[in-house]
Amino acid sequence: MFIQTEATPNPNALKFLPVGENVIGEDRSGKFFKKDSDEDRNKSILADSLFEIEGVEDVFLGSDFITVGKKASIEWPILKSPIILAIQEFYTSGQPIINEIDTNPKHRLAHDDDEVVKKIIQLLDTRVRPAVAQDGGDIIFHSYKEGIVYLEMFGACSGCPSSTATLKMGIENMLKHYIPEVKRVEPI
């Protein structure tokens, strides 16, 4: 099995692409796991095996990629080979990637009947999320209240030095342009 790697805008996150393999597929939102979160344990055998590698802090499973976040004090040349090996071993095991399937992505739960929210979600799903996925991350709608859109950032976007610029200059400007009710965008 061949695994490509791609740099992300976040120097502490690297995107791993198992060529010819699905990770979680196109029809589901990505899954984000943090090493120090007990609620994430045993939800993904792949994520659990990556957390056994010293220096791995978070794992984001996208449609056809895996983004791994590391401690700033450890360099990629030290981590890259063990991560690739863990991914290869996982795929040869034939085990499911996610043990617990969430059939209701977070951004679908809140305010499904609100027209402004429907427009926000549609723009995020069609214009923002595909571009962000190319950088190894995801941005999910969390809520909308009094003109403010609250978004949650995952994968390479979480902790990325350029995430604030992406949020304010890119996403906020686009949403304000297409949806006059939107006044501001904030991360949660």
Image (cartoon, grey):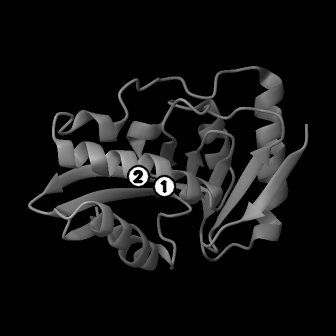
The three-letter amino acid code for the residue at tag 1 is Arg
Q: Residue at x 47, y 70 (%)?
A: 159
| Apparent side of residue 174 relative to residue 109 in the rendered image (left or right) | right
Residue 118, compared with residue 77, is above or below; it is: above
Counting other residues with Cα less than 10 Å from the Cα at mark 2, is it few (<14), some (14-19), or many (20 or more)?
A: many
Indicate whether 108 appears above or below 138. Answer: above
Say which of 34 and 131 sits in front. Answer: 131
Q: Position of residue 78 (x, y in %)?
A: 80, 66
Residue 169 tag number: none
SS for callout 2: helix
Asked which quadrant contains residue 186, the reply is bottom left
CB within 8 Å, label 2 to label 1:
yes
Q: Identify the image quadrant of the N terminus.
A: top right
**Residue 154 location, x and y as percent?**
47, 55
Q: Residue furthest left?
A: 146
Q: Is residue 164 above or below residue 92?
A: below
Q: Residue under label 2, please give it.
A: 124
Badge 1 element = helix
Q: Residue at x 33, y 70 (%)?
A: 172
Visible residue check, residue 58 = no
Residue situated in front as seen by the camera: 104 or 96: 104
